[in-house]
Image (tube, rainbow, N blue to C red):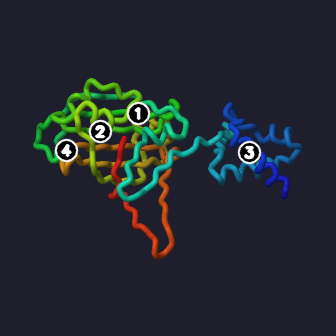
Amino acid sequence: MPLWAQLLEDLRRRLGSGEFVAGFPTDAVLMGEYGVSRHTAREAVRRLQDEGLVSRERGRGTFVTAPAIERSWGVGVAYSLFRSVESLGYEQRSRVLDLSEVTDDAVGERLRRPAGTPLIRLERLRLADDEPLAHDTVWLPAAVARPLLDADFTHTALYDELAERCGVRPTSGRERVRASVPDTRARGLLDVGPDQAVFLMERLSYAADEPVEWRETTVRGDRYAFVATWSGAGGATRRSASDDVLAS
């Protein structure tokens, strides 16, 4: 194996064991540790970058890339960001930015409610090990969700609280996902650069065929990935974003 490949293999091993939690070594450190040239060190690190294991920032150095939160697209799949984050060993926590009763006729129309209908608005910054992951705003009819005003959303799933306090759990829904560039406020909350793309998710959820939730979520593109599973001809299953039932 060429020297860069040998170095690459050992760096993968060390990354897998969590050795570089405190910081990834510089090219100069790698040259000294392994007795290789700068070209060899840079080639190995470049390969790690291509694999998404590290990222380089000019003037700042090389950083270990946090594993992406993966979401599978599937027919009738119940998905929970809360549980996905914790299944990777992160602590999922939310910073509640707003929990109040409001009126918003544009949202009310989406929920098939007449103008002036009171709504419960919940705005959260979703964190994984205290690192920003998503900015999430939810509206629900106050007649259904008013007991949520007494809930603590720091470390809990919305649908669990909705079921326990209100006796309602969404049974179906439709979600639209697209790439977007966040506005100034969202960039500040998510700690992303002005040119860094995000995913914008818009979700309408139903309970017993009645709309009960409108949600707008902005997710960091560098911390989130969509995964689709397919099989060969004859066994293929068509999967669609509109088939998802989501739990958060």
Residue 93: x and y, percent?
44, 30
Q: Amino acid at mark 1?
A: Leu
Mark 4 / mark 3, whichever is N-terminal: 3
Are the residues at dot 4 and dot 2 in contact (C-beta closer than 8 Å)? no
Give neighbour class at mark 1: few <14, some 14-19, many 20+ (Cα, 10 Å): many
Mark 4 lies on residue = 106
Discs 4/1, front: 1
Give neighbour class at mark 4: few <14, some 14-19, many 20+ (Cα, 10 Å): few
Residue 138 is marked as 2
Residue 13 is marked as 3
Q: Nearer the viewer, residue 190 or 234?
A: 234
Quadrant of res 237: bottom left
Q: Amino acid at mark 2?
A: Val
Please, what secondary structure does the residue beneath circle 2 have?
Answer: strand
Determine whether 119 is above or below 245 in the image. above
Mark 3 / mark 1, whichever is N-terminal: 3
Residue 125 is marked as 1
Discs 4/3, front: 3
Quadrant of res 35: top right
* C-alpha distance separating marks 1 and 2: 12 Å
* C-alpha distance separating marks 3 and 2: 42 Å
Residue 230 is marked as none
One can see residue 79 in this view: yes
Please, what secondary structure does the residue beneath circle 4 have?
Answer: helix
Discs 4/2, front: 2
Please, what secondary structure does the residue beneath circle 1 have?
Answer: strand
Q: Amino acid at mark 4?
A: Ala
Quadrant of res 135: top left
Mark 4 / mark 2, whichever is N-terminal: 4
